[in-house]
Image (cartoon, coloured by chain):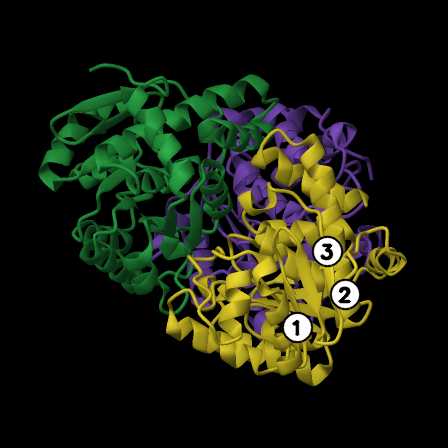
Chain colours: A green, B yellow, C purple
Amino acid sequence: MEPLTLADATVAANAAAVREQGPFVYGLTNFVAAPLSANALLAIGAGPAFGAAPGWPSAFAAGASAMVINGAALTSAATPDDLTTAAAAATAAGTPWVLDPVAVGAGAPAYDEVMAAVLAAGPSIVRGNASEVVALAGGDGGGSGVDSTMDSSDVVDLVADLARRLGTVVAVSGATDYISDGTRTVAVPGGSAYMPQVTGTGCSLGAVCAAFAAVTNPFDAAVAAHAVYAEAGARAEKVASGSGSFAVAFVDALNNL
Amino acid sequence: MEPLTLADATVAANAAAVREQGPFVYGLTNFVAAPLSANALLAIGAGPAFGAAPGWPSAFAAGASAMVINGAALTSAATPDDLTTAAAAATAAGTPWVLDPVAVGAGAPAYDEVMAAVLAAGPSIVRGNASEVVALAGGDGGGSGVDSTMDSSDVVDLVADLARRLGTVVAVSGATDYISDGTRTVAVPGGSAYMPQVTGTGCSLGAVCAAFAAVTNPFDAAVAAHAVYAEAGARAEKVASGSGSFAVAFVDALNNL
Amino acid sequence: MEPLTLADATVAANAAAVREQGPFVYGLTNFVAAPLSANALLAIGAGPAFGAAPGWPSAFAAGASAMVINGAALTSAATPDDLTTAAAAATAAGTPWVLDPVAVGAGAPAYDEVMAAVLAAGPSIVRGNASEVVALAGGDGGGSGVDSTMDSSDVVDLVADLARRLGTVVAVSGATDYISDGTRTVAVPGGSAYMPQVTGTGCSLGAVCAAFAAVTNPFDAAVAAHAVYAEAGARAEKVASGSGSFAVAFVDALNNL
């Protein structure tokens, strides 16, 4: 398994394609992560619209260049029906889409059932932390709220298994990120210890995966998104004085890559 | 059409009046733009309260110094009934209010119907981007999600027409902003290319229009809000290293004007 | 009444305990304050999860290390039933929890009734501004939206009275903060004039009180949270150029204390 960074030519080409094409990314996400997610998308050249206003889930899921469904959208006025409607509309229209099953398996079965229904609609990419990946694979991930209690390196094999079983790309983030389509698995090192100290860095990574999925295949999209994130995190850490200034520098770095 | 800036004496006097009177601005807005919108209002000396808790739309619309309704509040737990209730209560109480019809005409008829119902309640100011203004005027604005696909300069004549037809002040933002009451049309140049790269700059401009409408007539209010925004954007760009630090510097600039 | 600061040994020990234990803080809060609240919790070492997804209010209130209910969660897709369910589940499970009755008494009786029902479930700490404390005590606090029209020093005696009557800890924030358990009352000076110019500083203080309540008794928790906040505010003011950069520096200061 070769480590992969922003220096990779395919990653750089895809980042340039996002900036050139300015894909419209529709998202159902949560109010905690929404501002950072929108700003991360704008920083790389994409155009976000978030939320389930009347008619948006079906119309925007079909019309967008790509879509992200963050499970915690259920905390933020999106109904289970909005999520499954958007998922079905995206799949039907051929809109590539990302599922980020925030906090799945963390102790709320009613929530987990909605995640299972959305997953069944066939996302192009599933992205989560280690506890969430374990929970999706049917195990006990030991998640605490929205945070993982496991490291990404604990679940590398599971990521590939799950990708094969679901027939989708699966990405897990942690100190090193792993992305697999079931056949190939890539490791993306880097990032910053500040990233888990800033709310929404994981959720916004799902949105950035969607932006890349608008310009290339799901595997290369997920790899490029994680590589861009890792590089922006490493650059931001060099100028940060704490988690607050890190968040600002991180968006600057995404904007300047 | 004379370009107008912060150097204008009326604009400066109205900015001082907002800081002195500290108007209470009630808002129904969306969760993506809400933090920046609240911080922009606080930065210029106004006091915001956002959202549709039980009883708030009628009580706060009537009791506030001014109000803003951002259509994408429909993504954020405000119902169509909350929007029309607040709009009617504000009009009945004589509270000046701003409508920002985010993404109207972008492909979701159910959403567009709610915007039409709110518009019918008689806002003091309608503020949007070029695609939204075209859609409100009955044309095809070609909007993509919440972003415009047209430039403000394409719709100058339409802004004045729409203001006359609606009997309200209409403002369109872009590289140059245009504000019209149907008789007079003012151009506000300036701002920064970073502004469309920061989520909520347009939505928060609607909130700032409302703050000014609490201290002067709707036309001078919209002009002052746009002039203050353009100047703050130009100042922030000088110290920004990217879209992240621009957003921070922009709030600082609003705070220090 | 002795003024109390971060130099106090108990405060420092409790701040270290939060960083060491990393408590999971579940919160029902509003979309305006949520990003800052989550970032403040992460900055001091706690792990937040916010919002009322299906099953979360009962499961997470029972399972979390501590909880915060911010009344304006009612603007943000949490229903009155979500709030009372979470409150009852936390009390039943022995999860310490904080109530922040945002804008209670500001003119919306339907909203005030929900606050009364949540209060009846027995929070460990009630935190608000002066107008809200007066309203909870049955008086007319004259609140304007979410902002206070009174100073904290006007209500010192009321804070102790209310704490005795409710059998809980009551904290009021202002130029000087006061915290009482009905027997002892502590004054926490410091902070910054920028704090009321940044949205969500009060709401996030409620969340930080909850994080401390996970590691010590409610009185010491509220005192420590206010002392940490005051010190971070004072430090941030020294490097801020306006309310925008203050907000960033404030999170940095919380992160570096």
Q: Nearer the viewer, residue A23 or C218?
A: A23
> SS for tag 2?
helix
Q: Which residue is mark 1?
A: B160
Structural crowding at the residue carrying mark 1, measured as other residues with C-alpha within 10 Å and reported as few (<14), some (14–19) or many (≥20): many
Residue at the spot x=82%, y=59% of the render?
A: B18
Say whether residue A230 is left or right of residue B35: left
**Mark 3 and mark 2 residues within 8 Å of each other at the beta carbon:** no
Separation (CA) of disc 3 from disc 2: 13 Å
Residue at image location 82% in from the left, 51% down from the top:
B6
Which part of the image, by quadrant, shows the C terminus of chain C? top right
Dot 1 lies on which element?
helix
* Side of C111 relative to C157 (left or right): left
Q: Do labels 1 and 2 touch, CB within 8 Å?
A: no
| Marker disc for residue B188 | 3
Residue beneath the point at 36% across and 25% down:
A12
Where residue B2 sits, quadrant-wise, is: bottom right
Residue B221: which disc?
2
Task: Where is residue C154? Give x, y as percent.
Answer: 84, 55
Query: Which of disc 3 and disc 1 is earlier in sequence?
Result: 1
Relative image position of residue A185 (x, y in whole percent): 19, 24
**Precedes in sequence: disc 1 or disc 2:** 1
The amino acid marked with disc number 1 is: Ala
Would you say residue B194 is visible in this rendering?
yes
**Would residue C176 be visible to someone looking at this image?**
no
